Image (cartoon, rainbow, N blue to C red):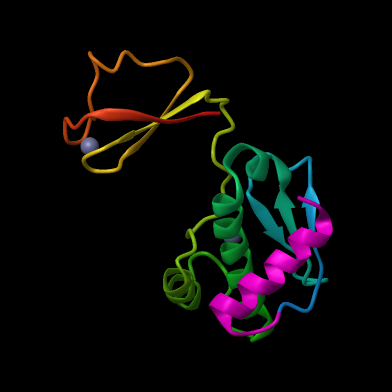
Amino acid sequence: MTEEELQQLVEAVSLEWFERPFRHTAVFNRRLRTTGGRYFLRTHNLEFNYRQYEAYGIETLTAIIKHELCHYHLHIEGKGYKHRDRDFKVLSSHVGAPRYCEALPEHHYSYEYHCVHCGQVYLRKRMIDLSRYSCGKCRGKLQLTRKV
Ligand SMILES: [Zn+2]
Ligand SMILES: [Zn+2]
């Protein structure tokens, strides 16, 4: 994904979920490790963790974008924009954004399985012997979703 595409995605998420435009700049920061993204109070710009996008794909990136846009819109509107603020809790749950911006671990998994019964997803570094293992939640059958 290029930075132009990132900018377009942030603008689209902002309109779709917040019904307000994003009028500043979004960039990738390849050095971010511990956070999924950052909002800059002074410039109103956003930065996103490129490695999270690489490791987890567009759905995770979109969740991070929603989280950072909560900071962005609330701050611009003079509302409580910090994680502990009530405005933040209400808005983040309304748009389905994660409450915090910590990055997910970057372990490199090779195999993704899901439970055919309850849908629980399992990421594993090695192949699982499907005749011996079942879902830890419901004992359902596991199926290989994809080899990453
Ligand atoms: Zn945050
Ligand atoms: Zn299950």
Outermost residue to the left: 139
**In the rendered view, does 40 fall on the left or right side of 101?**
right
**Residue drawn at (28%, 18%), measured in percent from left and top?**
130
Q: Quadrant of ligand 1?
A: bottom right
* 65 relative to 1, above or below: below
Q: Nearer the viewer, residue 108 or 36?
A: 108
Image spot of residue 64 (x, y percent)? 59, 57
Mostly what secondary structure, the magenta segment? helix
In the image, taking residue 52 as reference, residue 130 lies left or right, namely left
Asked if 105 appears above or below 111 in the picture, the reply is: below
Q: Which of these two is toward me, 72 or 146?
A: 146
Image quarter of the C terminus:
top right
- Which quadrant of the figure has residue 18? bottom right
State the residue at coordinates (82%, 56%).
3
Can I make out residue 80 in this image? Answer: no
Q: Residue at x 60, y 45 (%)?
A: 57
Q: Residue at the spot x=31%, y=13% of the render?
A: 129
Range shown magenta: 1-21
Q: Position of residue 136 (x, y in %)?
A: 23, 29
Residue 20 in the magenta stretch? The answer is yes
